[in-house]
Image (spheres, coloured by chain):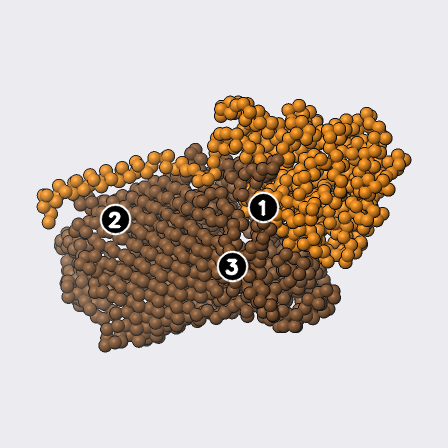
Amino acid sequence: MNMKKTLVVLLFAIIGISVSAQDRTVTGKVTDTRDGTPLVAVSVTVKGSNKGTVTAADGTFTIKVSSTTTTLVISYLNYVSKEVLLDSKNIVNVALSQSSDQLNDVVVIGYGSVRKKDLTGSVATITSKDFITGAITTPEQLIAGKVAGVSITSNSGAPGSGSTIRIRGGASLNASNDPLIVIDGMPIDGGGISGQANALALINPNDIESFSVLKDASAAAIYGARASNGVILITTKKGKKGAMKVDFSTQFSVANISKKADVFNGNEIRNIVIANGTSTFKSLLGVSNTDWQDQIYQTAINNDNNISISGAVKNVPYRFSYGYLDQRGVLKTDELKRSTIGLNLNPTLLNNHLSINVNYKLSISNSNFADQGAIGAATSFDPTQAVKSNSSRFGGYWEWLDPTSSTGLKSLSPKNPLGLLMQRQNSSNVSRQIASALFDYKVHFLPDLHVVVNTGFDVAEGKGTNVTNDSAASSYNRFKDASNKFHGGVNTQYLQKRSNSYLNAYLNYAKDIKAIGSRLELVAGYEYQDYKTTNYNYSDLTYNKTVVNAPNFASNVPEYKLISFLGRANLNILNKYIITASVRQDGSSKFNPDNRYALFPSAAIAWKLNEEKFLQSSKVVSDLKLRASYGVTGQQDGIGFYDYISYYNLGSNSAQYQFGNSYYPIYRPNGYYYNRKWEQTATANIALDFGLFDNRVSGTIEAYNRTTTDLLNEINQSAGTNFSNKIVANVGSMENKGVELTLNFQPVKNKTTTWDVSLNATYNKNQITKLTISDDPTYSGARYGGISGGTGNTILIQSVGYKRGSYFVYKQVYNAAGKPIDGLFADLNRDGIINEKDLYQYKGNDPQLFFGASSSVSYKKWNAGFVLRANVGNYMYNNVASSSGTLRNILNPIGYINNGSRDYLTSGFSGNGSNYYLSDYYVQNASFLRMDNINFGYNFGKVLHNKANLRISANIQNAFILTKYKGLDPEVNGGIDNNFYPRPRTFVLGLNLNF
Amino acid sequence: MHSYKYKKMKKNTFKITIATVFSVFMLASCSKQLDLLPTNDITSNQVYKDATGYKQAFAKVYASFALTGNNGPAGNGDIQGIDEGTSDFLRLYWKAQELSTDEAVVSWGDPGIQDFHNMNWSASNPMLTGLYYRSFYQITLANDFIRQASDANLSTRGITGADADNIKKYRTEVRFLRAYQYSILMDLFGSVPFVTEADLLGSVLPKQKTRTELFTYIETELKAIEADLVDARKNEYGRADKAAAWALLARIYLNAQVYIGTAKNAEAITYSKKVIDAGFTLISDYTKLMRADNNLNTSEFILTINYDGVRTQNWGGTTFLTHAPIGGSMTASGFGVDGGWGGLRTTKAFADKFTDITGATDKRAQIYTNGQSADISDLTKFTDGYAITKFKNIKADGSAGSSLVWTDIDFPIFRLSEMYLIYAEAVTRGGAGGDATTALGYINTMRQRAYGNTSGNITSTQLTADFILDERSRELYWEGFRRTDLIRYGKFVESTYLWPWKGGVKGGTSVDAYRKLYPIPSSDISSNTNLKQNTGY
């Protein structure tokens, strides 16, 4: 109201000045297109001048205009402005419609918010109305595929498993590539807690109002040292003044695996063994046909119920929410039960001078974790054997036996997949509380100045027990005590506590400088962050609680702190040119005192072309803005907390050394790197935001260039100079270049039908430009990415001149028929021998291009939509095929039969030697198109005597996938597909009632 | 509402606000806030505050022979870039010394492991890289310990009397361990970077010493510490004494022709004799050498790497040497372990060193043939090639070791038989100061234990250099000597001696002479600009 008053006064003042040039009087009424209600205090101005008025309480206005006036501009906050041509008429009635993305109008940025129109940086905002619907249990999945430049890939199909989020490909090698996540102003620690690996899974997605993704340095640099991988700001829902509103929703879903790993059946294995095996192997064959994958997977029935109540008690708006999720995994015994409570209070006090926003979130989850080893076991366990044996030993599960061994089990043999699941109970109880309070005080005598204090804590506790009973084959008689007695099973516990705290205080000064038609906004602040975890150590116990191994220390408390100062200036000139500059100084406890502080500056400029004369009258262009920015962000995640000096580590009880008749504990000096400092990423960004035809078509095209220097990179230490031969140091550089395109359009919009389409595309090219101190052409790079097969084989490499995470493989030789020749590889360096020197960099796991497309149509009370995602140019190492699709795997030399990948029929590989593991034959094109979500809804409208609104919906999640990839799923984070927990296909029915 | 009173309050509110904001800034910006310490890890001053801490840090220097890290069996490794289970000293050293010869073959597909048979290893072979860094790791620990145990540090920390005397003994032993690792590096890689306690960590890139310079250093160093080492057979079990230094001197002198181009057989005789005369005797039963309680074999063992199934656990060492050769029709429980790893066997060329491979005549022939073929048509097939049963995690009395997974068997780095063989070989090579009769006596002492009587005795005419090479194989097989021996005899790369799968060819083939040295890992070449790669790589 205050603002409107001000506006009125202001406008009257303006009118007062211009009263003299009048010629005629125009009157009219402004109404809302929705229901024809009059709109109050709408600004009515003469185009090209500063003359104007506002509408009265009944929506009417009267304005005196000169004879030369041709156009009136009618504008109102949150409504689409209209221009009305004045011909000879003196009565103008106008209906305004609400702007399609009302909430988008104000965008949450770091330490404040800004009108979307005034953004200078690259910030993508997704609000709740655009969230992906269906059985979404973890927040980031709400926006998967919705934002250009942001790739969100769920880590697996397990309940509550998180996602890997990459903004513009990530900026680092060995340090973290995860973006910083800020919830209601509080930066959170990305790591999970014991019993819940995904930190975000503890936030109820239903409590989220919006996401802002800060992609370029201008937007992110205000978060300085933690911003190199981009920042995701999550704003949760608030209470709203007005009558109490209750929103209830319930979802029921059924999930199933959509595809099984392609392995042999019992008859096929029998044929292979009979054709190739010795008599010993033939004698091992069973008579059953067991599909082990059918044995371990189940149809998972899930439930998600949420209720929220919002309103206001006197002057205190509130929102309370409660959610209960019961999610089962498609892998038997996997289950997550989660209760969440959210409370928000946002009163305004002291005559609107002090606004307070208090958030409290509590989540309690109880999980049971299946032994995921069963997934691999199910693809490799002999399908000719029955599930159960006739013996009661090992819980009655059939196992590979060896009567001569002390356990009765064949050493190193795989264990019955169903036994692995049913004989283990690993259950956890995790609670997490996030509380934050924001005080925004508008100084009484200087209302342009706000003092903002934001403080909060994030406290979590995860505990659990892992029990495997002593009849289980997986840990049968695993421990022999001092009196030569055997004990089996597992009975251990774990406990981890986390206590993070946060304080941020800043001053915000905003001033209109009328003389130059400009507005200046200044922010200066201080921030303190403390991340502390307490890990409790427990003994390794057998089922009957015999101590196998006791820890040296009861607990360990890793902690790090950040202290920062930040500032930002924003100057808007004539509403056409906007300049933003920010600077942040961060200090981190992870670095030595000399390298502790670093400065992260940024600058950006935006030019609103649509405000220029040559476009103002355009009927095509409704919005056009050119933006450019440059800035530096930092990185300190993913490195040691203390290792800038060498500390001594006490060895475990099982790592002592004998002198004479005594065993001595050992003290080891740890590797260290004194000169480690912040990794820095410089980002240049240029973008064009456009809106056409009254914003029916809108979008952004954006190009960026990010150069990371002083890469936190694990490098070799020259022998004899450190206690570790590899250490994370600041050596190397890397580039990411890319183009992003976002396009939203509304092909149909009329009274009954609305059709929205939104598309985004991202091209990202990554190249490592430096990795070592001295350039050594013979050094191929840093190999990593351990695979299953052999001991210590790795498949990936970081090499200069190549993209991050290239595969490092032998070039397979094929015969004329196109079949790979077993054990034959190209001698790339032509020295007559095949060794590591013949490995070459081939493809990589990161996609070069990725796309998201969503569409929604509403017709009367019906609506339908879909979300599609596609990746192009990404490859996958099919480790299931390489480790199991060989004869040697099926006829295991240790003396048992395995199942194997049907890829054996194609390759015919014997499995001898080790080079075949590293054949490029197994690096397969994993480009894909995935239908993430198809949804339908029907809005019944008012029910229950017009008291409530009812809506029902149905979703199919992970509906289908098109890909050439031969394994189970082309989308596995890390580029190695080794018995991936399958993502289920889920059918969801939902009901939403609000009153 | 906007009264005067209110205005006054506003002013106060402002003052309070500003004061609060600034005090918050001042309090929290104190940079001490950012000085954090780990909970359980401690600084060098805390470790070395007393004699107990010195002994524990000293134990780590030794333990880096046996363990792969600070958590048994794995989980907190010392060496990066290699699978931790395969990163211990003995497993890596053993592979480099045995898999490249006629004594052992392996069926596995670990990265780079088959290169040893194929003799096509490159400078990025992960096993050689791991071995190189493992040796340097122990050297780096030794340098640190020597610095911490300097007289100046001891007096600063107020350590005096018997404690100080003990710590000075530790310091001397650690110098021995460092010399030992330099001798390993000299033998495998030739010319390597050189660091001592005088080089502060990370201050400069180490400079390379030539093989000859390394030889001189090791020789000088061992002689320099000799007097300060505990007398032979007087130290705690598992710790080096004078005999260990003599044994190492004898070993490098025997190979001096290879290392420096000048034979030092007289010196080899002198130092092997010193060990022999220190009162060592052979244990009575050869087959009990590598058993769970072989820590009792102190009459024969000069220095050992100590393992324990409960307190010193790792996936290499004798755990590897016991599990890896079990496969086919072999019964794991007969070896005191829970199962075999189906990996290691031997070639026919080795088996043929024995006229009777059953062990009935020469008990040293601990060879398993049931279901195994003598010939190897497929290296990766366990049943191709005879298996070796030398290592058993069972005590001499037949009772079990402390664990079925990790073995208790200690591994002798030096034992008396080697000294007999060095003496005899140096004599046959014309070294001064020894005599053929004594040499023959030593050899026959060894053979009498093997045969149980004098039936295996040889005559003085049979005692030739070539005989000794074969005898070394019979006595010391699978103990990490073979590659060095074959090089000394000119049979490693040459066509004069071919064994199955030598050079990756079934019938065996010669390879380029440069393969007598392993390449310096490319990872070190790329991080230390002072280094020059060995010729050929």
Q: Mark yes or no: residue B165 visible.
A: yes
Q: Where is residue A196? Give x, y as percent.
A: 43, 56
Residue appearing at x 25%, y 62% in the figure: A310
Q: Chain of mark 3?
A: A
Could you say which chain is coloured orange in the image? B
Q: Where is residue A262? Give x, y as percent.
A: 59, 67
Could you say which chain is coloured brown in the image? A
- Is there a contact, CB below 8 Å, between mark 3 and mark 1? no
| Circle on res. A247 | none
Q: Nearer the viewer, mark 2 or mark 3?
A: 3
- Camera-side residue: A854 or B222? B222
Residue appearing at x 28%, y 50% in the figure: A437
* Residue A955 position (above or below residue B321): below
For the residue carrying disc 2, how many other residues have a C-alpha within 10 Å: few (<14), some (14-19), or many (20+)? some
Determine whether the residue tagged by mark 2 lies in a helix, strand or loop: strand
* Residue B283 position (above or below residue B390): above
Would you name the residue on which mark 1 appears? B310
For the residue carrying disc 1, how many other residues have a C-alpha within 10 Å: few (<14), some (14-19), or many (20+)? many
Q: Relative to residue A702, is residue B313 drawn left or right?
A: right
Q: Chain of mark 2?
A: A
| Circle on res. A439 | 2
Would you name the residue on which mark 3 appears? A468
